[in-house]
Amino acid sequence: DSDTISAALKPDMPTIELCLGAAALSLGMVMAGTGDIKSFKLLRTLRWKCEMDVKYGNHMAYASAIGLLFLGGGTCTLGNDPADIAALLISFFPRYPIFTHDNRYHLQALRHLYALAVRKRKIEAIDVDSNEKVLVPMEFDFGDKMCHKAMTPSILLNRGKTCKIRVTCDRYYPVEVVLDNVPAFNSTLSIFVKKKSGRLSYIQDPHGMRSLFTQVGRDRVAAREFIKSFVEDHRMVMYANHICDSNEGEASKNLSLSSIHMGDFCVDIVQECLRDEKTDAINIHLALYNDVNCIEKVACPSTKIQEFRLLKTLYRNSD
């Protein structure tokens, strides 16, 4: 008797498929535009079934859910205004057709009204030096302890009326942007960021193992190429090409210096100034180096010696 009752209470397959289609569309609307991998795997598994009980409408529901998951190629999401909710209700009404021209329960042309609820809310980061789009981890703070992190390019989700967007990584300088009316935002927000000295982008160094702080060498040829990979200023590139050249004699001759360690000195000060983000101090180091070599050759004015004593005292008292 118990088996008979259980069999009578068990829902039939069309009802189960109807519920699965409604659940898939609900998941697609919640995760619209995020491209979530776990959701995509689940929807792809549901769509893979090719049984007699799975009708055209069920496949349409799963395909629509996958389309919502990658809405606008990951640049758009769905609005939550009353008009948007009404358009979504009409579009995804859970009465699915049996075949392509089945309009008995729901006019299939109304399925396209979801486009009225689409909102473009793309968040991208642009490097101010290269003017190129870059990958930057950002934090989205909606208040009330609702906060999530994402890597740009990303989308702005419907989690509050206001949002604070912050750059929270050690490779770029901190930036904060405040959006006062998130539901009305329907555009692309470009946030300009500046990379810190001695760091590589997330495309060049995804795991942070190739920063200037972890690799310091004394081989001038290798160090020159390594320094050039960290800077985008053409003046620093020219400095790395000519001043840090492996031809020590030519470099010393061009700068009127006799020391054979000129190339090593240039590499050291470039690495130090890039590490401390004080590239303007390179000229001061070169001037001091030139003065020290001149003192060894010719008589030096007493004023110059006094200046060196003052610098020496300042250097000792700065620790």
Image (spheres, grey):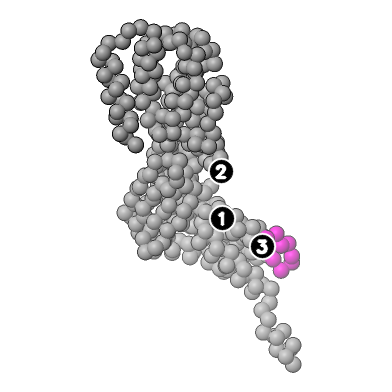
Q: Amino acid at mark 1?
A: Asp
Q: Which residues are magenta?
A: 45-54
Q: Choose the circle earlier in sequence order: 1 or 2.
A: 1
Front label number (1 vs 2): 2
**Residue 186, above or below 90:** above
Residue for point 29% across, 22% down: 309
Residue for point 51% across, 56% down: 32
Q: Nearer the viewer, residue 158 or 186?
A: 158
Q: Which residue is mark 3?
A: 46
**Residue 122, above or below 133:** below
Q: Which residue is mark 1?
A: 36
User: Which structural element holds mark 1?
Assistant: loop
Q: Nearer the viewer, residue 259 or 48?
A: 259
Q: Which residue is mark 2?
A: 207
Q: Position of residue 213 (x, y in %)?
A: 49, 36
Residue 174 magenta: no
